[in-house]
Amino acid sequence: MTKIISLFNNKGGVGKTTLLWNLADSIARNNKRVLMIDFDPQCNLSLAVLGTNVFTETLPTLNASYGTTIRAYLQRFIQNTKGFEFFSHQGKNTHQDAELVAGDFWLNVYAESLSVGSDLLTGIGVVKYIVLRDMLSFANQEAERKGQKLYDYALVDLPPSFGALVRAALYSSDYFIVPCTSDLYSAYCVGLIGEMLPGFFEDWKSGFTRFKRANPQLSKYDNIGSPKFAGWVFNGFDTRNQDFVTVDKTHHDKIANSVSQRLVPKLKDSICMNLPTSYKIGQIEDMNVLVQNSIWHNVPVSQLGNFRPLKTLQDRGSWTIDQLEQIERLGRQFDEIAKQIISNCI
Ligand SMILES: Nc1ncnc2c1ncn2[C@@H]1O[C@H](COP(=O)(O)OP(=O)(O)OP(=O)(O)O)[C@@H](O)[C@H]1O
Ligand SMILES: [Mg+2]
């Protein structure tokens, strides 16, 4: 069964999208089949993986009103029309076993169509909240029909909010991971996640209980709605010292403390087994100019050594020895997190 994992933090700019792409690529390099789902109307993931030109071709036009984005499945699902279609895309430099479901600005329309009061709590529209799960089943049926391997993981990229898209992704997910950056707000934001998620999970339970009363024979959604916390990632720390510099150490410890004091106790049993005692599943150093090269070239960071740096981003046409070492090191950092996910999210 495909494990659905949301990368979530209501704090913006913490590296959710960057991590998701690089982790999907690393998981695929560990012989797994991965689907990256761009569930953020900003579509940053799609732009990074496909590049602007290819991504633009996936969008709906007058002649192709659904396009080949996530909308092609979602819109038919929520409008209850026939002829479901599922499209995934390959980035030309991302591992071929890490495919993308392209995002769409239309996700804003989908989000506005969801109502906690009249869809979720009444139980009448709970299925509208688990469309990703349904899309995954459909994608796996298609894979089976074509004699392909089923998806091992689906990683969901989210906007920074506690809004409808986040609820819908979490209700569909088996696990969630919280990327955090080294700054003063991160520890506070982790606490907010601890405040909000138990309420989300309760809302699902009440809505689903009502739904079940009306649909007792339907069992495929029985054990969902409370994804397990699968750890946090410390992203973007400085590497001037062998160990953390003082400010990063301070932020790191504050976040770790907030995770264990203000998040984990609130989640009760919705915690992934086998996590490290700090709940941290890995860390990614500050990638500096490498990350911009990666996005411009549409190349995951671990593969940048095979490409030349862009003249528009730095004044030389080849990587320095230090940069080549950093690319290797980052590859290992992503691979370590990928391996944690593979061994923990089972
Ligand atoms: N480890 C890192 N080192 C340096 N820059 C980074 C690192 N991780 C991410 N970035 C940069 O930080 C910015 C924010 O990253 P990203 O878009 O992945 O965050 P996000 O959490 O997805 O943002 P949003 O909340 O808007 O979706 C981007 O410009 C990205 O290139
Ligand atoms: Mg993002």
Image: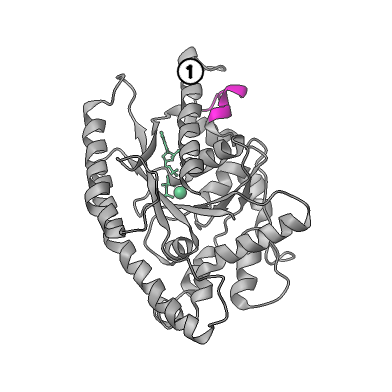
Specify whether tag 1 is near ligand 1 (CB below 8 Å).
Answer: no
Q: Nearer the viewer, residue 44 or 198?
A: 198
Residue 263 location (% of width, % of height): 28, 53
Question: Which residue: 62% across, 23% down?
Answer: 306
Question: Which residue: 49% across, 14% down?
Answer: 320
Position of residue 199 relative to residue 148, above or below, is below
Answer yes or no: is residue 120 visible: no
Question: Which residue: 41% across, 63% down?
Answer: 226
* In magenta segment, residue 308: yes
Q: Residue furthest top?
A: 321
* In magenta segment, residue 169: no
Answer yes or no: is residue 160 visible: yes
Residue 184 location (% of width, % of height): 23, 42
Q: In the figure, is residue 247 to the left or right of 117?
A: left
Residue 187 location (% of width, % of height): 25, 46
Q: Nearer the viewer, residue 193 or 240?
A: 193
Amino acid on which the number 1 mark rests in the picture: Glu
Please name the residue that numbered disc 1 is placed on: 325
Question: Which residue: 61% across, 77% down?
Answer: 79
* Quarter that holds the N terminus: bottom right
Q: Secondary structure at mark 1?
A: helix
Q: Residue furthest right?
A: 146
Question: Total label count?
Answer: 1
10 Å crowding of disc 1: few (<14), some (14-19), many (20+)? few
Q: In the figure, is residue 110 to the left or right of 285?
A: right
Residue 201 location (% of width, % of height): 37, 67
Magenta region, residue range: 302-312
Here the colouring is: one colour
